[in-house]
Amino acid sequence: MSVDLADSIDALKRSVNPPGEDLFPDTQDDEWLGRLQDAFWDARLDGLLNGYIVDDDGLITPIAGSVELTRDLVQIVVFYATANAIYAKLLNIKTLFSAKAGPVSFETQQSANVLRDLAQSLRDRKAILLTRLGDLQTTQTYYIDSVFARTENLVSGLDTFLGAGVDFRARGNSGQGFA
């Protein structure tokens, strides 16, 4: 039996908005559904949901031999979509705005520390999620280790990914490809 991601749009909206507010008033349900589909594939790339496929209509179907997708696993997709939407929103927030016209000036500032801490809390929640799924044997721990290593390297700005004793260097200015 398939699970329709369109049924999770309201959960995603609740997840990205404070109570009583709408931070994304112009966003249509088609875009929310697209973000949920993208989130499914992000989770799959992180080693989760390998027994499932999502189609262009947002229907998640088990691959032969897999059980029906449960609500807790659908919530993982909602979490990934939430994290992606919040990251996109953070990219668009200006931390300092000032204007001056003659003797009159105006300045407003959003704390970069608050934004950094919010992004860190999303990374921490993802780490807890992946660790818990490993404990439940929902996914293999080597997937979790590689996700943590990749995420930390990306966050730290490193251009290499070390795994299994092999140094895979990202294509840099040298144009030599992988070492």
Image (cartoon, rainbow, N blue to C red):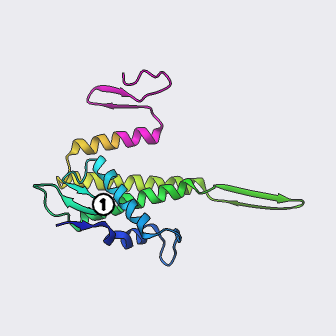
Region rendered in magenta = 150-179
Residue extending furthest toward the left: 65
Q: Quadrant of residue 166?
A: top left
Q: Amino acid at mark 1?
A: Ile
Q: Residue at x 59, y 57 (%)?
A: 93
Q: Residue at x 38, y 53 (%)?
A: 124
Q: SS of the residue at dot 1?
A: helix
Q: Quadrant of residue 110?
A: bottom right
Is residue 20 shown left or right of residue 35? right
Q: Is residue 110 positioned above or below 159 on the image?
A: below
Whole-percent x, y for residue 18 in the image? 48, 72
Q: Nearer the viewer, residue 171 or 16?
A: 171
Whole-percent x, y for residue 21 in the image? 52, 75
Magenta stretch encompasses residue 161: yes
Whole-percent x, y for residue 151 in the image? 38, 43
Look at mark 1 in the image and give the residue it sits on. 76
Q: Is residue 26 positioned above or below 56 on the image?
A: below
Residue extending furthest toward the front: 56
Q: Residue at x 55, y 57 (%)?
A: 114
> Mark 1: few, some, or many residues within 10 Å (few <14, many ≥20)?
some
